[in-house]
Image (cartoon, helix red, strand yellow):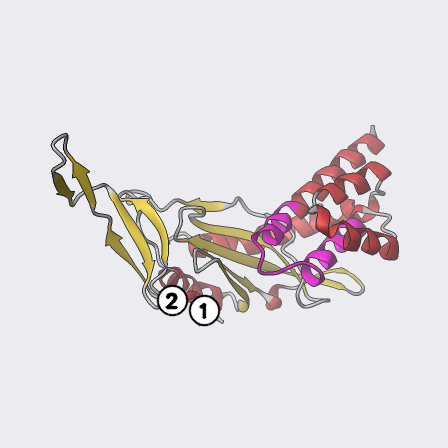
Amino acid sequence: MLQNAMFPVKEVPAFGREVSEKMKIKSIENTGYKFIVREDTGDVLSCMTDSYKLVKNETIIKAAEPIINKFNGKLKEVRVFGKGNSTHMSWHFPKHMIKIGKQDELTPEIVVGNSYDGTLGVNIMAGAFRLICLNGAVIGIVTQKYKNKHIKSNMSLDDFEEIISETMDKTKLIFKEEFPILIDTKIKDRHIVKFLEMFPLQANGIVTQSLIASKPKSFWDLFNVGTNVLSHHMNRDARSTHNIEGRLYPAINKWAMKEANLAVA
């Protein structure tokens, strides 16, 4: 699967022309811009300023794989969006499994993103992988989101090992401290409304059906409905699906913590 993300790209200088008042045309070799071109297809992925530093998916993969292998990570998914404009790659760590309930098991997950059009710098998000359904959604950020813009003076891939190690530790801590509150705290009608608002209108039918079928009572139940809809009923190739995945757990966790504090007060 990783081969899908390792297509060749190159930089091509953007030349220009200047027309004088006497209608004379002068070539401009240094416009301050360049094109990012996919070599195997010839597609122009973007036009960027010269300050943009091209960071290839291949470079990221070669930097990440040895460290991920060190932690016994397994490749889960590779998604290439557009003509190769951006890429999401994810690995999970089954040897670091955490039991949430009798039939509910989760492992840490690392999602690495990159783009050639400036929409995303090198981006690492940590979440968890639901083993029980084998294709569950990312549950949210459990370490600080690592972002590194493609700027010539701001590019380092040396932090991968520290980020992944931190993910293992903080994921286990989140599982221990946050999940019990989600499991034990009951939802209200207003939380169902907020939950529905997170999804696009065209998904309202399937989300409503899932809510009716599952009858969620706790925030953990509500989260399970969300991961099921995202992993089984929405387009995995759509960027919007991955955006909802990133927002789902933080939102539900925030609602649960607020409700739990109100109950204590």
- Residue drawn at x 70%, y 50% is 176
Residue type at numbered disc 2: Phe
Give the alpha-carbon distance from disc 2 to disc 1, as whole Å: 7 Å
Q: Residue furthest top?
A: 265
Q: Residues within 10 Å of mark 1 (few under 14, many from 20)?
A: few
Q: Main secondary structure of the magenta part?
A: helix
Q: Report the side of 166 relative to 58 (left or right).
A: right
Residue 5: % across, % down:
44, 65
Q: Report the side of 52 relative to 201 (left or right).
A: left
Q: Which residue is disc 1 drawn over? A: 4
Determine which of the numbered discs, if any, sits on residue 7 in the image: 2
Q: Residues within 10 Å of mark 2 (few under 14, many from 20)?
A: some
Between 24 and 159, the one lying in front of the other is 24
Q: Range of the magenta residues?
A: 221-247
Taking 189 as reference, is 2 above or below it? below
- 2 and 1 marks in contact (CB < 8 Å): yes
